[in-house]
Structures are given as structure tokens and as C-alpha cells.
Image (cartoon, helix red, strand yellow):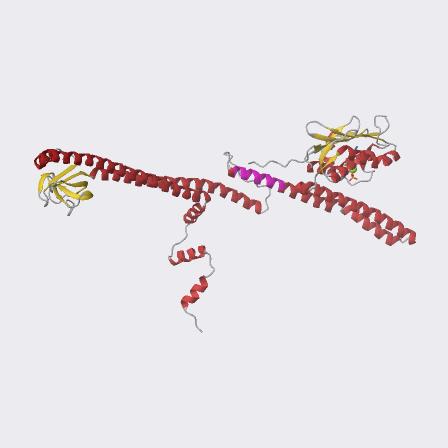
Amino acid sequence: MPRAAGAGLDEGRAGTVPQDKSRGLRRLMDLPTRPWMTALGKLLRTTAFKLTLVYLTVFAFFAASLLGYFAWNTRRLITDQITRTVDAEITGLSEQYNVGGIRRLVFVVDARARRPGSSLYLVTTFNGEGLAGNVGSLAEGVMSKAGWTETVYRRLDDPEGTEHHALVRVLQLPGGFRILVGRDLEERERLLDIVLSAGQWSVAVVIVLGLAGGFFVARRVLQRVDAMTETSRTIMAGDLSGRLPVGVSDDELDRLAVNLNVMLERIEALMRGFKEVSDNIAHDLKTPLTRLRNRAEEALRTGGGDAGYRAALEATIEESDELIRTFNALLMIARAESGGQSTQMDEFDAAEIVRGVGELYDPLADEKGIALKIEAPAPVPVRGNRELTTQALANLIDNAIKYAAPPHGGADGKPPEIVVTAAEGEGDKVLLTVADNGPGIAEADRGRVVERFVRLERSRSEPGSGLGLSLTSAVAHLHGGELRLEDNGPGLRAVLALPRHGRQLPTPAD
Ligand SMILES: Nc1ncnc2c1ncn2[C@@H]1O[C@H](COP(=O)(O)OP(=O)(O)OP(=O)(O)O)[C@@H](O)[C@H]1O
Ligand SMILES: [Mg+2]
């Protein structure tokens, strides 16, 4: 069944967003979208501009209410004043009537009516005939109704057709005469006009100034947000070195930019670390894997019977264990470096850890002819990750045993010796120290030995993959502490300095 064109059109539009509609409307009206229109639209949509509009509306409403209240009160005040003076005057005149009769009243009214001013007087007979006063004409029925009326009138000396407004009071006198006393309202109306036009002008000025201010603020904010958007686009495109512009005013946008920059810094460091790890793995694990493969190939090629194969397999297992150890160390370093808040942190006694690890390494030190001294008599409480701290300390003791043992150790002629201590250090630090009297590390090499896979040339004879100090240093950083390598004159003193209360998160700029 053919559908009505209108129905089809409506269905087609159903579900479209309002912008589409306005775009459709624009096309319909054949209006090209100019760049300044888009810029203006952007400006009008900013939070700063919307906030200005809200404040402006509230303020304009408040100003209008204030002026309205002022106008209404002024009007009431003037009316009150008129009422009071008219009341007093009419009482006085009726007393004159009571004392001197209609003659006296007419005389007095006549005299007052001649005075210039805004007062109105009229005395009439019971059938409305004017006896004295300055009123030329009145609205119909005013004189016949006693009490207060707001009416139009013309003064006697005014040309025909002139009309004024007045507030009048009519009083019926005992003999059937009537007296009217009133005041012209021109003054009251003029005052109201002044207040109203002042109100209109001030509201108009408030709106114009407010809108101009809103545009100015919105434009400033927009410019800065646009600059941020531009930078974030380059960052999104892959250039992690980009940083958001930070102004000098230290306002909320500056603080946001500072915090985002700190975040970008962290992301960049993590990405760099990630890249380094993958580069290292690719580069440094290739050699042992190739060696493993070559050994297996060699065993296959040369044969050698069961014993030969067995020996080759044992060597393969040993080499594989070494590879697994390296992988584990790399994983631990990566975890420690990126761990941050996800790492479990507890309160524990560092002295207990020193004693425990010392005990573990004592037989090995003994076997190598090294005296291992543990000096941790008093408890040293610290907040951190127990397992990682143990591992870090074990790496330092392992190094000391490996590199301070004969023939390297005892460089000062004294028997090789390692002293491990746990103590409270300067400030809020806890210091775990491993000092040996081996060859030590030259000052120039102390920076690079903590990098992954870095081993000094003379250490090649010892087993190891150059990851021990990297892990220790990563653990120190994870805790917000540091690994210091110092001269023990002779030998190396490795100090693992950890903050007593654990890692303090960097305070964001607020
Ligand atoms: N106590 C020390 N005395 C002298 N040199 C040291 C000492 N500790 C470390 N080094 C030097 O620093 C290098 C890096 O040490 P690291 O612990 O990172 O690796 P490694 O001991 O060679 O291997 P791994 O710890 O992975 O088994 C060592 O190869 C060694 O040259
Ligand atoms: Mg080591």
C-alpha cells in the first residue's frame, strides 16, 4: 500500500538528533555555515557562558524586583501623604462650614482655589451646581459619590480638552452641600516614570555588560581549552613527550593541566620502561636461547650415547633454569616498577628480615670463607612489601658474597667480611645496609650497574644476569625510597633506604 508522503517524512526524521534538525533547517533556509558561526556556537555552548547567562538572569530578575519594590513603595508613600493632607484639609473646611455656614466655606474655598499649586477644590449645591473652587470639569458621577476616587479632571484655567489625573475626596455637608478636595497626581506619575525608565536602563546596561563579560570570559576559557585540546591531539597521535600548556594564574585549568602533565610524565616513564624491558628481553635472552639451541644441536650431531645425551639434557635443564630465573627477575622488576598502589603494603620489622636473610646466606658465606655479621638487635618497624624487601636485601647479600669472596675479596688484606645492618636512619628513613670489603664499584659505574643486564667486566666469571641491583633499585622506588651505592673503603656499601611510613602518594596540585 503506498504510504502518504508526510508519514514517510516523519518516520525518516524519527530518531534524528536535534543538531541534524537544525542542519536540515539551515539547508532548507539555504544558509551557508560560516567559520565564525561555528566559533560563535562553540562560544555560546561553553560552561562559562552558560554560567554567565544564569547569573545574568538571576541578577536582572533581582534588579527588576528591587526597582519594582522601590517604585511601588514610593507610589504608596506619595498616596499616603496626599490622603493625609486632603483629610486634614477637608476636616478643617467642614469645621469652617459648621462655624460660618456656606458663605464662609465658599469664601475660604475661593481664597484657597486661587493659590497656585496642585490642590483641587470644589463646593457644589445638592443638585451639583458649582459654588466655588478651581475645577473646570470632572468625570461623571464623582461628586455624587462620597469618599475617595481617582479621577480625570480639568482645571478652570486650563484650556478646553486638557485632562489631568487627581486623587479626590468628596464630603457631604449637613445642608446638602458637597465639598471636594483633592491633589493632582502628575508628580506621582512623573516620579514613577523616572523610576521605571531608570529601571529599564539599568537592566539593559546590566544585560549588555553581562553578555560582554560572558563573551570575554568564555573566549578566554575557550582559547585555553582549545590549546589543551590541540596538545592532547598530538599526544593521542603518539607523541607522548607533549605537555599541556600551563598558564601563570594558577587557576583550576592550570592545576588540571599540571596534574595531567604529571600523569603524562608517569605514562611516558611506564611506556619507556615497558619498551626497555621488551628491548632487553629481545636482546639479552637471545644469547642464552641460541646457546641452548646450539648445545642441543651439538648433542644430536655428536651423539655420545646415553651418557652424552644425559649430560646434554642436564646442561639444557640448567640453562633453562637460568632462563626462568631471569624471566622471573624481569617480571618482578616490571611489577615493582609499575606496581604503585596495587602492591600490598604491611607493617613489619626490618631487623627480623635482616636476621632471616642473614641466616639463609650464612652457610653459603661460610662455604666461601666469608664472615657474615648481622647487626640488627633492636626492632626497626617499617611499612612496605615484605616479600619484595626480603628479595631486595637477598640480592645485596648475594652480590656481596659473590664479589667479596676470595679471590676478589679482602682487598685490604683483611679476611673477607660482610656486615649487614638494619637501623633507623636520618629523617624518617629506615636503612638496610650491606657492606663488604671486596673490590667495590668505581664511582663512574655506580649509576649504570642498577640498569638491567649491566654487569661489570670483571664479574663475568661469576654466574648472574645483571638483574639483582635493578630489582633492588625498583623495590626501593616502589616504596618511595632509594638504593645508594657507596664506597666502603675498601668495598661496597649498599644502602636500601626506605621511608618508615611507606610510600607517600604525590600530592596533586589542588
Ligand atoms: N658487592 C659488590 N662488589 C663489587 N661489585 C658489585 C657488587 N655488587 C654488584 N656489583 C657489580 O654490579 C653488577 C650488577 O649487579 P647485579 O646484582 O645487578 O647483577 P649480577 O649480580 O651480575 O647478576 P644477578 O644479580 O642478576 O645474579 C655486578 O655484575 C657486579 O659487577
Ligand atoms: Mg647480583
Majority secondary structure in the magenta region = helix
Residue 77 placed where, x, y %? 26, 36
Q: Would you say residue 16 sits in the magenta stretch?
A: no
Q: Is residue 290 depicted above or below 419 in this figure?
A: below
The image quadrant that residue 446 belongs to is top right
The image quadrant that residue 149 belongs to is top left
From this viewpoint, which residue is outermost toward the bottom?
1
Number of numbered labels in the structure image = 0
Residue 456 in view, yes or no: no
Quadrant containing the N terminus is: bottom left
Residue 465 placed where, x, y %? 78, 41
Residue 497 placed where, x, y %? 72, 32
> In this rendering, would 60 be left or right of 124?
right
**Camera-nearest residue between 96 and 71:** 96
**Camera-nearest residue between 504 and 112:** 112
Q: Would you say residue 256 sits in the magenta stretch?
A: yes
Residue 340 placed where, x, y %? 66, 41
Ligand 2 located in image quadrant: top right
Quadrant containing the C terminus is: top right
The image quadrant that residue 21 belongs to is bottom left
> In this rendering, would 231 be left or right of 415?
left
Write the residue at 41% across / 68% down.
Answer: 5
**Camera-nearest residue between 363 and 31:** 363
> In this rendering, would 306 be left or right of 91?
right
Residue 223 in view, yes or no: yes
Write the residue at 45% across / 57% down.
Answer: 20
**Camera-nearest residue between 452 and 419:** 419
Q: Give the range drawn in magenta.
A: 253-266
Q: Is residue 47 depicted above or below 356 in this figure?
A: below
